[in-house]
Amino acid sequence: MQLALTVADPVTQSLSDVLVELDEDATVDELAAELLRAVRGAPAGAVTSLAARRAGAELLTGACRLYLHGEQVDGRQPVRESQVREGSLLGLRHRCETIESIPPPSCARD
């Protein structure tokens, strides 16, 4: 499964469009860890592949929380059963309901 998502990162105060490949049984925690990697370290335009990473590399899970429509998404839930959909705006570690709601750096620390 592929999803195109927009990720709001309070640390970098940025919005990133990310295309991610997921296994059908990928959890929200796994997606969150992969999105964190993508917005903080992947080159622009890269496709991040959780499926490939699962095949041979250790995953970091529970690395951060994801928020959708201002509510934390249950990290244990499979992505396919969650409310995360193509085009979703997801907040990393903070509630992000709209693009305008990205907090200033002083609010970005856990």
Image: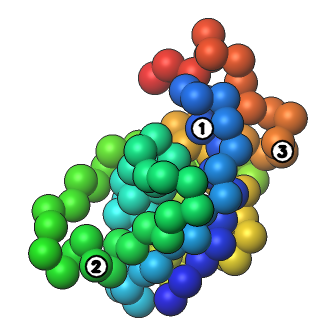
Instruction: Say which residue label 2 marks.
Output: 52
Quadrant of res 3: bottom right
Distance in Å between CA atoms under marks 2 and 1: 24 Å
Task: Depth check: give the residue in front, 79 or 19.
Answer: 19
- Residue 103 x, y percent position in the rendering: 71, 24
Instruction: Say which residue label 3 marks.
Output: 98
In primary-sequence order, the first of circles 3 and 2 is 2
Q: How many marks?
A: 3
Give the label on residue 91, or none: none
Q: Residues within 10 Å of mark 1 (few under 14, many from 20)?
A: many
Say which element carries label 1.
strand
Q: Residue at x 18, y 81 (%)?
A: 55
In primary-sequence order, the first of circles 3 and 1 is 1
In this view, 92 is above or below 13: below
| Tag 3: amino acid | Thr
Q: Residues within 10 Å of mark 2 (few under 14, many from 20)?
A: few
| Tag 1: amino acid | Asp
